[in-house]
């Protein structure tokens, strides 16, 4: 994946975080808490995307071995097949995010500022789960893990700061719409990968 594709993917994965950070940011909190929460969000995204990558890479290697043993296709054909599978996972993830957003009709008006302790860990995990699925799909592609970690960490950290910082000004209506945009971006990214492979 190119740096631009990783940047777009990182921004798409950050939309879920942004949709949560905006309403949480409506509560008054110190800058130190906002900064610490942004670091935790970035670290959780990096850890889960790398975990997904290694699992996907392992399964991709198994698929490659099975395919090489039992078919006449070259390694390039197998690599293309793995990229197609990864693109389909990204597209499916985007569809899932849109479906989940459209089905969530009950607004949660009792949100408190959960940016401390165990509640921060649970929140960081919940907004980073999509990164695991994206990492799984990238495990079947050629990805520079250092570049992925740096770009993802910077983007997620920035999105968390912006979401929490602008929470008071933006309002709740945009928070829900941003996740729809993220789902659409993941679908477009998956279709782009399919287009380049096919």
Image (tube, rainbow, N blue to C red):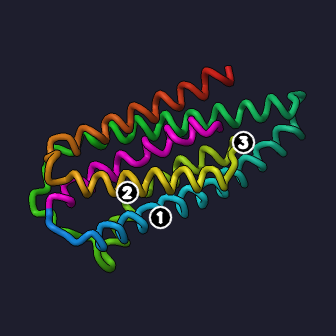
How crowded pointer 1 is (Cα within 10 Å; few <14, some 14-19, many 20+) is rated as many
Q: Which mark is residue 44?
A: 1
Q: Which mark is residue 78?
A: none
In the drawing, does residue 132 fall left or right of residue 120?
right
Disc 2 and disc 1 in contact, CB within 8 angstroms: yes
The quarter of the rendered structure image containing the C terminus is: top right
Is 40 magenta? The answer is no
Residue at point 36%, 41% (across, down): 97
Quarter residue 15 falls in: top left
In the drawing, does residue 5 fall left or right of residue 156?
right
Q: Which mark is residue 127?
A: 2
How crowded pointer 2 is (Cα within 10 Å; few <14, some 14-19, many 20+) is rated as many
Q: Is residue 47 above or below residue 193?
A: below
Disc 3: which residue: 142
> Nearest the camera: 56 or 158?
158
Q: Residue 122: x percent and y percent?
A: 35, 69
Please report whichever mark, 2 or 3, sits nearer to the chain's N-terminal start. 2
């Amino acid at each position: 994946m190119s740096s631009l594709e990783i940047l777009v993917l990182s921004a798409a994965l950050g939309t879920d975080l942004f949709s949560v950070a905006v309403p949480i940011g409506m509560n008054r909190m110190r800058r130190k808490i906002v900064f610490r929460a942004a670091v935790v969000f970035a670290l959780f995204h990096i850890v889960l995307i790398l975990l997904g990558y290694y699992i996907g890479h392992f399964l991709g290697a198994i698929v490659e071995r099975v395919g090489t043993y039992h078919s006449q296709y070259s390694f390039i054909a197998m690599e293309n097949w793995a990229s197609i599978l990864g693109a389909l996972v990204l597209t499916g993830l985007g569809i899932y995010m849109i479906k989940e957003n459209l089905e969530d009709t009950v607004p949660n008006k009792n949100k408190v500022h959960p940016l401390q302790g165990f509640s921060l860990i649970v929140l960081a995990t919940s907004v980073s789960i999509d990164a695991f699925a994206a990492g799984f799909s990238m495990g079947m592609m050629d990805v520079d893990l250092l570049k992925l970690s740096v770009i993802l960490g910077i983007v997620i950290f920035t999105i968390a700061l912006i979401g929490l910082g602008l929470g008071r000004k933006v309002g709740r209506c945009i928070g829900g719409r941003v996740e729809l945009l993220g789902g659409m971006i993941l679908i477009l990214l998956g279709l782009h990968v399919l287009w380049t492979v096919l």
